[in-house]
Image (cartoon, rainbow, N blue to C red):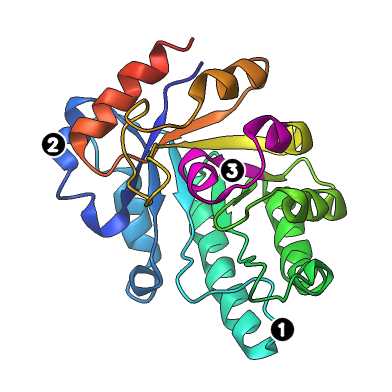
Amino acid sequence: MQGPHVHVPFDRIEDYRHFIEEHRLDLEVYFSSRCLDRLGNSDIMELKEKFAYTPSFTIHAPFMDLSPGAVDEKVRAVTVGRFSHILDIAEIMEPKSIVFHSGYEKWKYALKTDVWLEKSMETWEPLSRRARDTGLKIAIENIFEDEPSNLRLLMDEIGSDYFGICFDTGHFNLFSKVPLVGWLEQLRPYIHELHLHDNNKTSDDHLAIGRGTFDFTTLFSVLKDRELIYTIEGHTPEDVLKSIERLGGYF
């Protein structure tokens, strides 16, 4: 197993710089839309050269208010613009993957998965081609999905080795109505990355691995033969270190 990446917002990197360097962490850098509006290429180059070692990077794209499957074309156009900007940044940073949210909420789409899928394809097909052509991998993260079929449909439609799933343990634990093995049966071939955090099924607490009720033993057992990116999403330095320790115990 390669060392895990640790999630950190771009505008909090300096706050945690000592902690990051002390533990020589690889990073998943989250770029909010507000960050994108003030960043230039020089800022990204500075990030690559900021540390006394050379970390591996992944990227988490902006998601607030964005909707890759939007029926409103203007909303989707803004979303595509934000996502295209992230791909511009990725061509400089050379991350191992870029995580995007699916934007699917079954009640918002009145359970019409076909409507969401049709509009999502208009967004993801050109972005996935660009990712493939530049050697970048896109990973779509489960958020509010209570079962995995919409994500499986999207994976099947795109059909690219450069377009896969980021399986988020905390979001599964909070929202899913389907057992974990059901998700893994459908999505295992497409999972590129894991977002690792825990909760007690009441809120998205981003606790350390093992501090909630998610079944990490089953997850790692089923996925043991896959080469994956492991990303820690603890919200405190203490939970990050505890998650890294407990993750190592599974391998």
Prevailing SS of the magenta stretch: helix
- Is 54 displayed left or right of 215 in the figure? left
Compare residues 29 and 64 and report the one nearer the observer: 64
Q: Nearer the viewer, mark 1 or mark 2?
A: 1
Above-or-below relation of 244 to 73: above
Does residue 238 belong to the magenta stretch? Answer: no
Query: Would you say the residues marked 1 and 2 are in contact, meaning their CB atoms lie under 8 Å apart?
Result: no
**Viewer-nearest residue: 107 or 228:** 107
Please give left or right for residue 123 compared with residue 8 in the image: right
Q: Secondary structure at mark 1?
A: loop
Which of 139 and 36 lies nearest the eye of the viewer? 139
Amino acid marked by disc 1: Val
> Residue at image x 63%, y 47%?
177
Residue bearing mark 1: 71
Mark 2 residue element:
helix
* Kind of residue at disc 3: Cys
Segment tinted magenta in the rendering: 165-184
Q: In the rendered image, is residue 136 in sight?
A: no
Amino acid type at mark 2 = His
Q: How many marks?
A: 3
Residue 184 falls in image quadrant: top right
Which is more N-terminal, label 3 or label 2?
2
The residue under label 2 is: 18
Observer-side mark, 2 or 3, equals 3
Which class describes the residues within 10 Å of circle 2: few (<14), some (14-19), or many (20+)?
few
Residue occupying the point 64% across, 22% down: 223
Q: Which residue is mark 3?
A: 166
Locate residue 243, reporting x and y percent: 33, 26
At label 1, counting other C-alpha atoms closer than 10 Å, the crowd grade (few under 14, some 14-19, many 20 or more) is some
Marks 2/3: CA–CA distance: 28 Å
Locate residue 244, reporting x and y percent.
33, 23
Q: Is residue 179 within the magenta segment?
A: yes
